[in-house]
Image (spheres, rainbow, N blue to C red):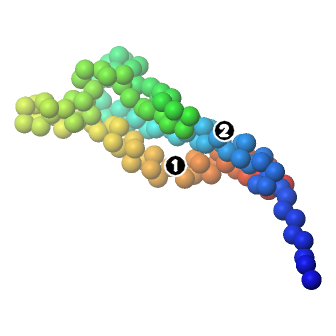
Amino acid sequence: MSDDVTFSGPFFDGTMAAEWPGAMEDIAERLGGQALSNVMANLDSSIRHPTPYYETQIHSERIGATERSVNDRGVIYGHWLEGDGSRNSPVTRFPGYASFRRAKQTLDGQAEGIAEAVLEPHVGRWNT
């Protein structure tokens, strides 16, 4: 006696495989945007007398299909503002704002929800 099993659906017909890279790019784009927003919010709440130049240099940059970098384009005093420069501790006693580090920590808690929100419409199509 033999039973035939037939598999069908997006997972088996290649639909999911074709859409997966685009979904991952969408997630990376949203995470990069959220990371940028987190950095800007941290700076807005930390800097008492902001100068617009530094904030205009911060951007989210695509470095791969599923990779984004949020950086300050190498502004010379960026490390000092972040608090990881050589002149932070004993020389100036300014500890830095840690805007990027705090943004990453916040993003770690937001990432799963962002990924789920991006994947939800895809999963709906894959489950048909």
Q: Nearer the viewer, residue 83 or 25?
A: 25
Task: Please tell me which residue is depicted at 71% across the width and 47% down the height of the picture.
Answer: 17
Q: Which kind of residue does numbered mark 2 sit on?
A: Gly
User: Is residue 14 something one can see in this rendering?
Assistant: yes
Relative to 32, 94 lies left or right: left
Crowding near pointer 1: few (<14 within 10 Å), some, many (20+)? some
Q: Indicate which label's residue lies in the foreground, 2 or 1.
A: 2
The quadrant in which residue 74 appears is: top left
In the rendered view, would you say 57 is above or below 102?
above
Residue at the disc numbered 2: 22
Q: Quadrant of the C terminus?
A: bottom right
Q: Position of residue 25 (x, y in %)?
A: 60, 37
Dot label at residue 111: 1
Task: Please tell me which residue is depicted at 79% across the width and 55% down the height of the picture.
Answer: 12
Task: Please tell me which residue is depicted at 61% across the width and 42% down the height of the picture.
Answer: 24
User: Is residue 55 something one can see in this rendering?
Assistant: no
Q: Residue furthest top?
A: 53
Relative to 103, 95 lies left or right: left
Dot label at residue 90: none
